[in-house]
Amino acid sequence: MPDAPLWAVVLAGGVGSRFWPVSTPERPKQLLALGSERPLVADTVERILPLVPPARLRILTGRALAAPIQAAVPVLDETNLLLEPRARGTAPVLVWAAHTIERAQPGAVFASLHADHVIAPAGAFRDLLGRLAALAAREDRLYTIGIEPTRPETGYGYIRVGAPLESPTHEVGAFVEKPDATTATEYLRRGGYLWNSGIFVWRAAVMLEQIRRHTPELAELLPLLDRGDVQGFFERAPVLSIDEGLLERSDRVAVARATFAWDDVGTWDAVGRTRATDEHGNVGVGDVHLVDAGGCIAWAEDGPVVLFGTQDLVVVRSHGITFVTPRARTAGLKELLERLPEELRSPEG
């Protein structure tokens, strides 16, 4: 266990348009059952609660999602929610969270998690978080978790692993942008590169000190939070990710290799990795009937979906829309949506 109080914040904003037509602004990706029979955010909260009590858990989201998230995770109430006045990316909202936690419990450590990750086994995840929290309690470092690549993935950022530090961590040699397929294949062959999971552990005060040192566009706004002017802080904050705004600028970042399996469920194809499959590699959710089908993902919310003699397809029926694509094309969903009329792009929830 860490030597300082451990908090957890869960990033639960965003829509997740890559799960069209099921995802909507009223029911975004984190409220879908993409990893189990329950919404992703419910799995995330259950995974962390044995390590962090509910009183030290905060969900970072928008006001419109407050009620749906509470409905999905009944153990939470309004005191667990930090409702950002407007979406400004992960850097401003994590600065707000760090400021809030440091005021509530000076010296506290917090873990920053995402509501839409699938992780197993949960025990190994908690064990690693606990080890990093213990380090963060006494070291002025920002800790992140990297994932050992299992395939040449062009949709993730990478971390080049540097010199060893106190076990189980290493210096971060560099953060690397999403590579092309050739580069990702080379990373996999060569080793020494990890996927950037976006899971962080640090002392709130250390994170704020590093913001003051490396992120002037947010540091100059901290007096607004000191005065309790959260609205003013978000009105003036730039749209900025924590990776770009702090981690890529700081020389105090360390990485630990994950001891668990991880997936950020970024496309429909990922559901074939995160949900249980039948003996033919199919995933079926809802009133689905699969005959002589293999490697298919079928999701039915508007009546039955039947697949016969098909291979490696995604078939989704939701909000009066039937969506069919090869699994290999699911990463291009953004391109598809740009070419559809507005009434199809944004189905009513």
Image (cartoon, rainbow, N blue to C red):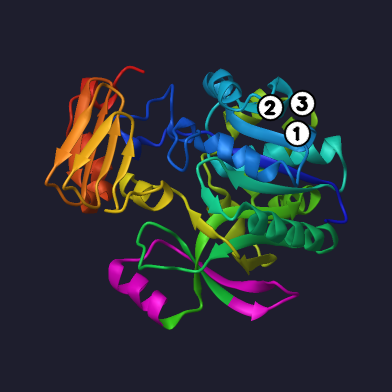
Q: Name the residue carrying label 3.
A: 228
Query: Is any atom of residue 338 visible in this view?
Result: yes
Mark 1: secondary structure = helix
Q: Name the residue carrying label 2.
A: 75
Identify the disc placed on residue 54. Answer: 1
Label 3, label 1: how many angstroms apart (C-alpha)?
24 Å
Which residues lie in the magenta part? 162-189
- For label 2, the crowd category at 10 Å Cα-Cα, with few meaning under 14, some 14 to 19 and many 20 or more, is few
Looking at the picture, which amino acid does disc 2 mark?
Val
In front: label 2 or label 3: 2
Does 136 sit above or below residue 286? below
Q: Residue at x 18, y 30 (%)?
A: 340
In front: label 3 or label 1: 1
Q: Is residue 174 left or right of residue 337?
A: right
Q: Quadrant of residue 54?
A: top right
Q: Residue at x 26, y 53 (%)?
A: 280
Residue 211's spot in the image, x, y percent? Answer: 69, 51
Label 2, label 3: how many angstroms apart (C-alpha)?
28 Å
Q: Residue at x 54, y 39 (%)?
A: 238
| The C terminus lies in quadrant | top left
Q: Earlier in the sequence, mark 2 or mark 3?
A: 2
Query: In the depicted view, which residue is nearer to us: 313 or 102?
Result: 313
Label 2, label 1: how many angstroms apart (C-alpha)?
8 Å
| The N terminus lies in quadrant | bottom right
Q: Answer yes or no: do the residues labelled 2 and 1 have beta carbons within 8 Å?
A: yes
Looking at the picture, which amino acid does disc 3 mark?
Gly
- For label 3, the crowd category at 10 Å Cα-Cα, with few meaning under 14, some 14 to 19 and many 20 or more, is few
Query: In the depicted view, which residue is nearer to us: 15 or 77?
Result: 77
Mark 2: secondary structure = loop
Q: Residue at x 36, y 78 (%)?
A: 186
Q: Earlier in the sequence, mark 3 or mark 1?
A: 1
